[in-house]
Image (cartoon, helix red, strand yellow):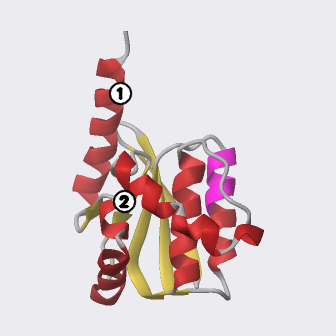
Amino acid sequence: MNITITKTEGLVPVTILHLEGKLDRANYESLIEEAQEVYDAGDRNLLLDLGGLIFISSAGLAALHQVALLFRGEEHPSQDEGWAAYRAINRDRDRGTQEHVKLLSPTKEVREVLDLTGFGSLFEVFTDLHQALVAFSQTVSATAASLP
């Protein structure tokens, strides 16, 4: 899998990770590491561009979940926890979609996997870059409006 990074400076800054190839057991850790570096650099809004992703395995799905936990400021489960950590995704469905991680343009094959596994309800999925970027600013506005 190849990952490239771009940053936008719209109403709110958004970092975009463009994924190409296959996201599977052989490389899922590279997605987590890239996301960790972005987060450690202070970026708090992440858009995962899946337009070039032709395949995603269960390890890739677990990586998406770990990235979402990271950007929520939660500690992600260790890899030693195995499927028990993966099952924690079911608890996340009650929380609604991720505020700081969104998905862009998944291929038909990847979208089918996301929907089949329930990930389509965990992440906001966009087909238009502009709409995805606007959604981040709406999240920030809604959060600011709810503050006392």
Magenta residues, as a range? 35-40
Residue at the image point whose x is 44% and y is 47% from the top: 100
CA separation in Å, label 2 and label 1: 19 Å
Instruction: Please provide percent x and percent y for residue 143.
Output: 35, 27
Q: Which quarter shows the C terminus?
A: top left
Residue at the image point whose x is 30% and y is 58% from the top: 124
**Which residue ends up furthest to the top in the rendered image?**
148
Q: Amino acid at mark 2?
A: Leu
Classify 10 Å Cα crowding around label 1: few (below 14), some (14-19), many (20 and above): few
Side of 41 relative to 98 (left or right): right
Q: Which residue is mark 2?
A: 122
**Label drawn at residue 46:** none
Q: Amino acid at mark 1?
A: Thr
Q: Which residue is mark 1?
A: 143
* Secondary structure under the numbered disc 2 in the rendered image: loop
Residue at the image point whose x is 40% and y is 75% from the top: 50
Q: Is residue 23 magenta?
A: no
- What is the quadrant of residue 83 in the picture? bottom right
- What is the quadrant of residue 4 in the picture? bottom right
Q: Earlier in the sequence, mark 2 or mark 1?
A: 2
- Magenta stretch: helix, strand or loop mostly: helix
Q: Which quarter shows the N terminus?
A: bottom right
Contact, mark 2 vs mark 1 (Cβ under 8 Å): no
